[in-house]
């Protein structure tokens, strides 16, 4: 577990700040993460990588010549906000476009996708690159649904080298697609990791057993199995990957044995010998083997094996020089430090025009409701995290607390300046999305913003308007997240809430109370559903019998609002 810390909630930010100050010749801090400290030539395609913290040396440890131009660093195991990603991408852009690389997780897809759209609206070509190397998370017929784990290293290294070589954005994207398709990973966990400030791991594994197909965000394995000897484990990993080799793979491979944070290097060397022998026996030619910690999961005990299948395009890019804090190869050309200052602050929602007196009154009510929401979510943090850890990464409670705390602070600030309901909820939504990160951060940010758009800054709050605003929030969440009723998400609580609100008269407190009951029933019904979307999808069967934490927290939120309305 993490013992050296100040404030557990600020652990990721302090770690990134310390990394940047420890490697000033490589990194410079920027709001949302880090960028190269060296001068980069104009006209170069930029590669920005990122995701949640807790995976060092991924992702900030890979920023430097020949590799990435910037890294976006979210909270522990939680995707960064769209604002953070936008900030790092702007700092990295050199006029030839930005490629944003990340593992295939729902929150990352939403938040990085928002950043890419914002960059495009400003005339900057931006594209998202999703790593999908984990064979345990989906079958060969569903390659696009696979998670990204330790395959992040070879895919980003090769893609970064293509950028450094001066290829166009179309050419670099083609290289990424090529290397991603030829990368496969398979891993196991011996014990779960412990979040900073927590006193117990996210999951337990019985002695002598292992979780097969673990995730790097603290998720347990798809199933448990007997551990056996190092050679037994080597056989399982090698056989699993060879059975899933890409079409026309050839025989030259880069094997990467990756420790997850708590497994000793000596153990990795022991299993590497067994892996090497089995690969040779399978007729493969081993090129440039890598053994160490490359994509970790805090203090998770476990390891993964990645095979990168080389070809004439990938091999020279894999072997090309690079110089980063955590990964070096060969000798790069002489570089010059970039002394330009980068922004350390997010753009804030400001009060352009004061709201009408009636709307200002609504805004003050919004601040009170958000404060109550924050209090309730804080008291529910541990339980929401426990529900999330059964088939997810255990960060839902922390994320909801961070998001609501930031939202009420931002709302209070603009309301004190005379903001109406729209501006107050827009500020709250932006702050929630930024501080919570992840899927829930993006969805709650969108929900609050949509609600405020209907209320406006120039009118009071009427029952019909509230119903319309709730419906707009539902539409925004469904449009952004892509979930439908029955997918085991917050939609299973949110949709019955809105439909009941629509159907239950004009007395708002009565209608809201009935809608809360419908939402609660919908949330509880998710216990009987196998997860089909989000991080819980690979562990869908394990989610059976446990309600969706996002649906449960939605009920907590609307119940709190109901007490204000009543």
Image (cartoon, rainbow, N blue to C red):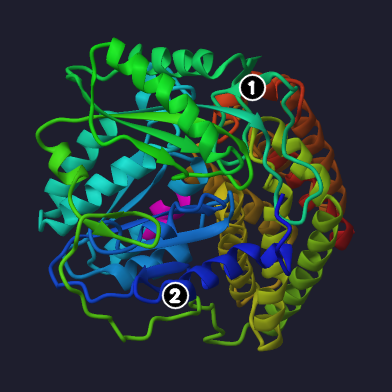
Circle nearer the N terminus (1, 2): 2
Q: Picture quarter containing residue 318?
A: top left
Q: Position of residue 450 (x, y in %)?
A: 56, 58
Tell me if I can see residue 503 in this picture: no
Q: Eyeballing the image, is 484 above or below 476?
A: above
The range drawn in magenta is 110-115
Is disc 2 placed on a helix, strand or loop?
strand
Q: Eyeballing the image, is 125 above or below 182?
A: below
**Mark whose residue sits in front, 1 or 2:** 1
Is the residue marked by circle 1 packed among few (<14), some (14-19), or many (20+) residues within 10 Å?
many
Most frequent secondary structure within the magenta stretch? helix
Taking the magenta stretch, the answer to whether it contains residue 300 is no
Q: Position of residue 424 (x, y in %)?
A: 64, 74
In the foreground, 541 or 148: 148
| Residue found 66% across the figure and 75% down from its top | 410
- In the figure, is residue 90 to the left or right of 358? left
The Cα–Cα distance between marks 1 and 2, rounded to whole angstroms, is 39 Å
Q: Which residue is mark 1?
A: 210
| Residue found 76% across the figure and 78% down from its top | 361
Q: Eyeballing the image, is 278 above or below 9?
A: above
| Residue found 62% across the figure and 23% down from its top | 211
Q: Position of residue 398 (x, y in %)?
A: 72, 54
Q: Eyeballing the image, is 335 above or below 286?
A: below
Is disc 1 placed on a helix, strand or loop?
strand
| Residue found 17% across the figure and 50% down from its top | 320
Position of the C terminus, as image quadrant, is bottom right
Q: Position of residue 337 (x, y in %)?
A: 27, 81
Q: Which residue is mark 2?
A: 29
- In the image, which disc is placed on residue 495? none
Is the residue marked by circle 2 packed among few (<14), some (14-19), or many (20+) residues within 10 Å?
many
In the foreground, 457 or 306: 306
């Amino acid at each position: 577990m993490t013992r050296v810390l100040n404030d557990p909630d600020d652990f990721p930010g302090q770690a990134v700040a310390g990394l940047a100050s420890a490697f000033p010749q490589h990194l410079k801090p920027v709001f949302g993460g880090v960028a190269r400290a060296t001068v980069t030539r104009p006209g170069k395609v930029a590669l920005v990588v990122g995701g949640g913290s807790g995976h060092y040396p991924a992702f900030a440890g890979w920023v430097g010549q020949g590799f990435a131009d910037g890294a976006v660093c979210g909270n522990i195991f939680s995707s960064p906000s769209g604002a953070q990603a936008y900030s790092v991408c702007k700092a990295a852009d050199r006029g030839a476009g930005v490629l944003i690389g990340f593992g295939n997780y729902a929150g990352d897809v939403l938040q990085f996708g928002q950043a890419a759209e914002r960059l495009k609206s400003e005339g900057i070509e931006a594209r998202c690159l999703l790593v999908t190397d984990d064979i345990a998370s989906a079958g060969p017929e569903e390659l696009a649904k696979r998670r990204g784990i330790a395959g992040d290293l070879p895919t980003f290294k090769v893609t970064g080298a293509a950028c450094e070589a001066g290829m166009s954005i179309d050419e670099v994207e083609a290289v990424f697609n090529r290397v991603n398709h030829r990368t496969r990973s398979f891993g196991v966990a011996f014990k779960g990791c412990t979040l900073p400030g927590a006193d117990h791991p996210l999951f337990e594994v019985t002695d002598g057993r292992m979780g097969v197909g673990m995730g790097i965000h603290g998720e347990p394995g798809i199933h448990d199995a007997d551990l056996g000897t190092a050679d037994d484990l080597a056989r399982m990993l090698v056989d699993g990957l060879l059975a899933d080799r890409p079409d026309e793979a050839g025989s030259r491979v880069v094997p990467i044995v990756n420790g997850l944070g708590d497994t000793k290097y000596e153990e990795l060397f022991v299993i590497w010998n067994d892996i090497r022998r089995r690969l040779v026996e399978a007729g493969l030619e081993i090129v440039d083997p890598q053994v160490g910690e490359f994509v970790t999961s805090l203090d998770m005990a476990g390891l993964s094996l990645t095979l990168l299948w080389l070809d004439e395009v990938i091999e020279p890019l894999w072997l090309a020089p690079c110089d980063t804090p955590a990964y070096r190869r060969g000798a790069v050309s002489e570089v010059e430090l970039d002394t330009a200052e980068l922004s350390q602050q997010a753009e804030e929602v400001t009060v352009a025009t004061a709201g009408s007196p009636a709307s200002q009154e609504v805004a003050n009510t919004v601040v009170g409701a958000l404060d109550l929401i924050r209090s309730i979510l804080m008291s529910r943090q541990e339980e929401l995290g426990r529900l999330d850890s059964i088939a997810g990464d255990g960060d839902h409670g922390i994320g909801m607390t961070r998001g609501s705390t930031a939202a009420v602070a931002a709302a209070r600030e603009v309301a004190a300046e005379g903001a109406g309901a729209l501006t107050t909820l827009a500020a709250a939504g932006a702050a929630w999305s930024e501080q919570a990160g992840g899927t829930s951060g993006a969805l709650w940010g969108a929900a609050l913003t949509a609600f405020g758009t209907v209320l406006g800054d120039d009118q009071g709050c009427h029952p019909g308007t509230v119903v319309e605003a709730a419906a707009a929030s539902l539409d925004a969440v469904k449009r952004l997240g892509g979930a439908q009723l029955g997918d085991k998400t917050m939609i299973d609580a949110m949709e019955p809430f809105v439909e009941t609100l629509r159907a239950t008269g004009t007395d708002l407190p009565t209608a809201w109370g009935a809608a809360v009951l419908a939402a609660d029933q919908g949330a509880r019904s998710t216990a009987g559903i196998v997860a089909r979307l989000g991080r819980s999808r690979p562990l869908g069967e394990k989610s059976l019998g446990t309600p969706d934490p996002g649906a449960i927290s939605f009920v907590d939120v609307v119940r709190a609002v109901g007490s204000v309305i009543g």
